[in-house]
Image (cartoon, rainbow, N blue to C red):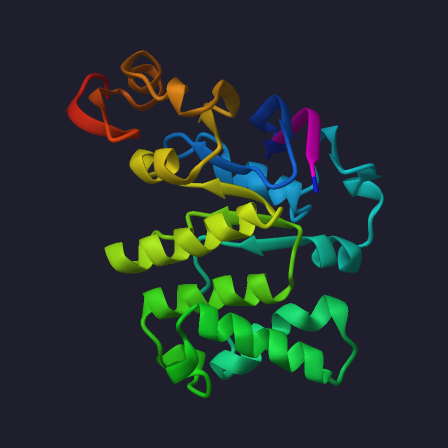
Amino acid sequence: MKINIEGLEFSYNGRPTLKNLNLKVNKGEFLSIIGPNGSGKTTFLKCINRILNPKKGSIFIDKYDLNKLRREDIAKHIGYIPQAERGAFPTSVFDTVLMGRKPHMKWIPKENDLKIVSDVIKMMDLSEFSMKNINELSGGQRQKVIIARALAQQPRILLLDEPTSSLDLKHQLEVLDITRKQADNDVTVIMSVHDLNLAARYSDKILMMKDGEIFQGGGIEILTPENIEPVYGVSVDVRYESDQIWILPKKVTCK
């Protein structure tokens, strides 16, 4: 599904957090939102999922106005993965992932629901933990379960807020490889991420935010020292090797 956002604004306690955001994301695109802490990345994702209601502006998924859709209809189309979930219910990994099927089923899951959950658990390499209490897992393992729950929804739009923040290097790549495959299968992916190198490696497009506004948007060509330094206050070297871009921090240039 494609996303069209026009004039989006949001405020916390009267303080503008998002300022006149306009964005189009095509079906099957992988968009990474980058920017320093406090730039509005998480708030932006929550507005797209209607966890937060914008002060102004409109969000359309295909031809549907998000503000006119019921919560259960939004859940059928949009999967959301928050930064972290604490105090999870003491349920098994399987039952936690099964919760992702709730928008598509009634009280009793059907055979197809159980198969989808089993397939997602296997894909996320969580089979050995399937019957284990989620609260007994490490932080990184729990994050993979939350991602699996979202994938079990079979969403056409996938929103991820710092999905790799609690994962080691191996699991970061595994999770983003799986996410990239979702985009390759026509799922529209929007991910907030701090690691500029991961954004460059996996994204079709990049949105650079600063102080609640879009500073720059486009392909990986926007990842230049001239764009990065005023947004992050850090000077960088940008190098290309084997069609891959690498951003190497040098020093802090402003506090």
Q: Main secondary structure of the magenta part?
A: strand
170 over 39 or under it: above or below: below
Horizontal side of 255 relative to 145 (left or right) equals: left
Q: Quadrant of the C terminus?
A: top left
Residue 77: say if magenta. Answer: no
- Residue reaching furthest left? 250
Where is residue 236? Give x, y as percent: 21, 21
Q: Quadrant of the N terminus?
A: top right
Residue at 65% in and 41% down: 48
Where is residue 154? Give x, y as percent: 64, 61
Where is residue 210? Give x, y as percent: 44, 23
Residue 6: say if magenta. Answer: yes
90 over 25 or under it: above or below: below
Is residue 245 at all visible to an observer of this figure? yes
Residue at 36% in and 69% down: 141
Q: Disc count in the image?
A: 0
Magenta extent: 2-10
Horizontal side of 212 relative to 104 (left or right) equals: left
